């Protein structure tokens, strides 16, 4: 199910590994090695090429810090690239989590722009095992994407990919504001 929205933003309920975009964003862990949730699904669907590039990045820079982002091939995914970003673990919201989460979106969008990627798809970063409240995370995501797109030509399209009805409703509410 797909709902077109103004300002180059689209909302899709489905599987991020099946999105036909230039890049999908991976809610990675700081080691950049195969994890669970979205990260595990992306690594399984994309195959070993993604993990090989993640290992090379890890050897070069020692992983990826919270709020930062790196880019790899998409391997066997429909997307040519994966942008890996490390979201914050929720600790009540008083340890910089909103700014760290905002940095995930900004740094991912910056990489998409630097690589002239026409489209990028985001999952709900940090809302799984990292425990970030879904409504607050959706608000940060929509705000940061809107601000970026208002100031930049690339990427031309951003897709929020949600897995379930609850998240779809939360993103619809944020996008309607």
Image (cartoon, helix red, strand yellow):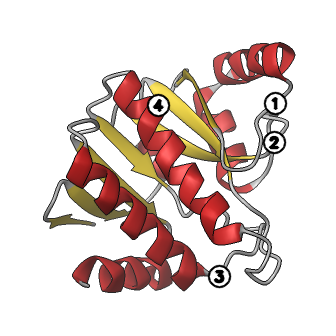
Mark before the other along the chain sequence, 1 or 2: 2
Of 125 and 139, nearer the camera is 139
Mark before the other along the chain sequence, 2 or 3: 2
**Element under label 2?**
loop
The residue that label 4 is drawn on is 111
Q: Residues within 10 Å of mark 2 (few under 14, many from 20)?
A: many
Quadrant that contains the N terminus: bottom left
C-alpha separation, residue under disc 4 versus residue under disc 2: 17 Å
Q: Quadrant of residue 28?
A: top right
C-alpha separation, residue under disc 3 versus residue under disc 1: 25 Å
Q: Are marks 1 and 2 in contact (CB under 8 Å)?
A: yes
Q: Which mark is residue 30?
A: 2
Q: Position of residue 4 (x, y in %)?
A: 16, 64
Q: Position of residue 137 (x, y in %)?
A: 55, 73
Depth-wise, is mark 4 or mark 3 nearer the camera?
Answer: 4
Vertical side of 108 occupied by 3: above or below: below
State the residue at coordinates (80%, 45%): 35
Mark before the other along the chain sequence, 4 or 3: 4
Q: Position of residue 92 (x, y in %)?
A: 79, 84
**Element under label 1?**
loop
Q: Are marks 4 and 2 in contact (CB under 8 Å)?
A: no
The residue that label 1 is drawn on is 63
């Amino acid at each position: 199910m797909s709902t077109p929205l103004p300002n180059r933003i689209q909302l899709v309920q489905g599987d991020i590994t099946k999105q036909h975009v230039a890049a999908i964003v991976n809610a990675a862990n700081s080691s950049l090695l195969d994890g669970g949730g979205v990260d595990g699904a992306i690594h399984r669907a994309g195959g070993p090429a993604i993990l090989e590039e993640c290992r090379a990045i890890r050897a070069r820079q020692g992983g990826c810090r919270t709020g930062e982002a790196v880019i790899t091939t998409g391997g066997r995914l429909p997307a040519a690239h994966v942008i890996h970003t490390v979201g914050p673990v929720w600790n009540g919201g008083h340890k910089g989590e909103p700014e760290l989460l905002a940095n995930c979106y900004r740094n991912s969008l910056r990489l998409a722009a630097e690589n002239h990627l026409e489209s990028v798809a985001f999952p709900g970063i940090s809302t799984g095992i990292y425990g970030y409240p879904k409504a607050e995370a959706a608000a940060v995501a929509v705000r940061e994407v809107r601000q970026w797109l208002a100031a930049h030509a690339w990427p031309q399209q951003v897709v929020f990919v949600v897995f379930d009805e609850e998240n779809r409703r939360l993103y619809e509410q944020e996008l309607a504001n």
